[in-house]
Image (spheres, rainbow, N blue to C red):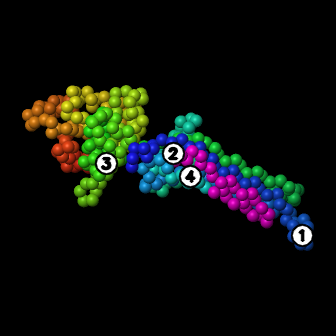
Amino acid sequence: MTEGNFVDYVKIFVSSGKGGKGSTHLHREKFIEKGGPDGGDGGRGGHVYLVGNKGLWTLFHLKFARHVKAGHGGDGGGDRSTGADGDDKYIEVPLGTVVKDKETGEVLFEITEDGEKRILAQGGKGGLGNWHFRSSTNQTPRYAQPGLLGIEMDVILELKVLADVGLVGFPNAGKSTLLSVLTSAKPKIADYPFTTLKPNLGIVAYRDFQSFVIADIPGIIEGAAEGKGLGHYFLRHIERNSTLLFLVPVDTPDIKAEYDILVNELTKYNPEMLDKERLLVISKIDMLDEELKAELKTELDVAFKDIPYMFISSVAQQGLTELKDKLWAMLND
């Protein structure tokens, strides 16, 4: 999937169908001149549904479908025949899609399971025919109900990526490189900040044909929660991850300070982020010899008493097996 095809935010206008009107028909046939009311009911208007589809990873297919309208219900007929129901509309969305009312910002519901079907806009109810209004004092009612109007609304669809592990780090920390060596994903890699402009997903193959999903989230910088840089566009994708992997290069001037900035931005965006499992990974460890590595380990043991950490090198393929084992253990604890 190219970056241009990854769409995680769309606005659409949906309109359910109007209900059909009831019939005022009076029964007539040979030898029966005044047969009484037999008007049927109108059909209901079409619903607009959202359906989860695990085969979709983006909202790109809805990027240009700005209006979704269901069909109107048919009018009732004679002989108590009910009008046809309006055609329903089905909008397929990837798992992890959040639906919001554009006007109020209220979260209406979320789609998290394959095949899950939820009504977004309910069709109008069909009107009752005159047969329902007959009585001993009014044996030939010449009126019926009109159908109810459908619902029109502007909604926002937001995708929150469903992944087991979220890669968190500053721009140019090596997240895309790590994703490329752990999985078969082929993210864009270059030696400049903000190379990754969209979240990348990869499947990590583990032992005994088992696997887990890891997501490379575009770089977060200080102030991202307030809208600085690109991070504020993608912080919502981290909400779904059960485990957060903080990636900090070994040549960072202050590893603890950089880690604290990342944690602070996540906390400001959503305090519940602190409840997730965390793992600190120090990358580019091939730049250090054993003596410098031992000195750094002594410093980190003091700075990170409660947070587990590991050393890896994506380029030199060091510590990757141990990293997979650690992540698998954390996901299945």
Q: Secondary structure at mark 4?
A: strand
User: Disc 4 vs disc 1: which is toward the camera?
Assistant: 4
Tell me whether circle 2 and circle 1 mark residues in contact (CB < 8 Å): no
| Residue 322 rendering spot, x and y as whole percentages | 19, 47
Residue at mark 1: 32
Residue at mark 3: 186
Q: Residue at x 51, y 45 (%)?
A: 63
Between 195 and 227, the residue placed more toward the observer is 195
Q: Is residue 272 visible?
A: no
User: Disc 1 vs disc 3: which is toward the camera?
Assistant: 3
Residue at mark 2: 63
User: Is residue 241 magenta-colored?
Assistant: no
Local packing at callout 2 (Cα closer than 10 Å; few below 14, some 14-19, many 20+) is some
Q: Amino acid at mark 1?
A: Ile
The residue segment tinted magenta is 62-87
Q: Residue at x 76, y 51 (%)?
A: 146
Between 225 and 200, the residue placed more toward the observer is 200
Residue at mark 4: 49
